Image (spheres, rainbow, N blue to C red):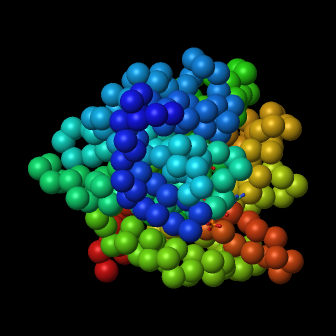
Amino acid sequence: MSEDEHPPMAPYLMKGESFSIRPVRRMDEVRSITEVIRKAWDLTDLENIATFEMKAVADFGVVLMASPNENPFQAIGFIYAFPMFPDRNYSHMMGIDPAWQGKNVGFELKMVHRDLALQHTNPQINEILWTVDPLLPNNAWLNFGKLGVICKTYKINYYGFPEGVGIYSGVPTDRFLVQWQIRSNWVENKIKNVREGITRNFPMYEQFVDDEAVLGLIENSKPVKKSSLAEIMKKTETTVVEVPVNYQHIRETDTQLARMWRLFFREICTTLFSAGWIASDYIRARDEKGTFHNFYKFSKEATFSKKVEE
Ligand SMILES: CC(C)(COP(=O)(O)OP(=O)(O)OC[C@H]1O[C@@H](n2cnc3c(N)ncnc32)[C@H](O)[C@@H]1OP(=O)(O)O)[C@@H](O)C(=O)NCCC(=O)NCCS
């Protein structure tokens, strides 16, 4: 594509060994992102982002693309975000080409978005928000484990019940509205832990099994409550609940089980959030055989805020 047809590409904001990140300016970049959306979510054209609209948001909001170093015009990942009055950004979508998932592209895109937001003055940006299916384990680990988001808002069936719409089919579209408080010590520490490899020191699963503050574990792929929510709220200020490491596979192969998980987790979140608790972390634990187990951690908001200030 010649530069007569497109403006020059914007300078890179991050250059890594195999991929780089820059703001989107050109229509061929925009079109390449719509291809990532199609692949990452398996969506139809109706749910994709209209190209002229994305161009407008690229100019007046934040649209970032990641591309392989050997092919700067092929998008392999993107962020599509816009300002929210007065001091927040809303990151409507982040998607990574399935061939590039699990390679830190999502994390680095968020780092660039955060850097841009931190540089913004008048008004200062303090928080970036987005919605996410809380049961998708890679999203949850990236968001809570690596980036340090928190959540206190649960949206029931946010996009309705879109039968036949890509990766969301068959199960109510409940979402977390997560908050990424980009200037907090909590977030700083999480990022430092990723950079220093500390995030990979996984705790042992066995420590959770007999712990009284555990709300639930998984037995035969199903959720099993170890304590009632009422008991937990009476006797502790934090709790954890095990959630599937393979939720996407469950959704694709056993819709009934996927719905059971949705309703089980919905009840926990709506009850705890309305009592002033928040989802504060996501833990990957390993058992003696080396198998991973994932847990959400919930905390009383006051307890969590105190811990973060320490
Ligand atoms: C969610 C998404 C954006 C993440 O991007 P990504 O580039 O794969 O993210 P990263 O590689 O930075 O982080 C993913 C982490 O999840 C981990 N992970 C993968 N499967 C996991 C599982 N079952 N349980 C726990 N963690 C898991 C990866 O190992 C990686 O962590 P690590 O770096 O500590 O090893 C990407 O998978 C995607 O596009 N999904 C489809 C669209 C979507 O859901 N978008 C987000 C909502 S708008």
Compare residues 303 and 170 and report the one nearer the observer. Answer: 170
Query: Looking at the image, can residue 12 be seen?
Result: yes
Compare residues 235 and 31 and report the one nearer the observer. Answer: 31
**Horizontal side, residue 289 vs residue 224: left or right:** right
- Kindly indicate the quadrant of the structure image that contains residue 309: bottom left
> In the rendering, at what x and y percent does residue 138 appear?
64, 55
Residue at the spot 57% in from the left edge and 76% down from the top edge: 199
**Horizontal side, residue 136 vs residue 83: left or right:** right
> In the rendering, at what x and y percent does residue 264 appear?
67, 44
Indicate whether 144 appears above or below 38. Answer: below
> In the rendering, at what x and y percent does residue 250 appear?
80, 43
Residue at the spot 88% in from the left edge and 55% down from the top edge: 220
> In the rendering, at what x and y percent does residue 208 appear?
69, 74
- Give the number of marks: 0
- Kindly indicate the quadrant of the structure image that contains residue 302: bottom left
Indicate whether 1 appears above or below 272. Answer: above
Query: Where does the C terminus fall, quadrant-wise?
Result: bottom left
Compare residues 2 and 61 and report the one nearer the observer. Answer: 2
Name the residue furthest left.
122
**Horizontal side, residue 65 vs residue 102: left or right:** left
Figure quadrant, ligand 1:
bottom right
Compare residues 215 and 184 and report the one nearer the observer. Answer: 184
Residue at the spot 33% in from the left edge and 28% down from the top edge: 56
Indicate whether 266 appears above or below 109. Answer: above
Query: Looking at the image, can residue 82 be seen?
Result: no
Indicate whether 83 appears above or below 243. Answer: above
Residue at the spot 40% in from the left edge and 56% down from the top edge: 12
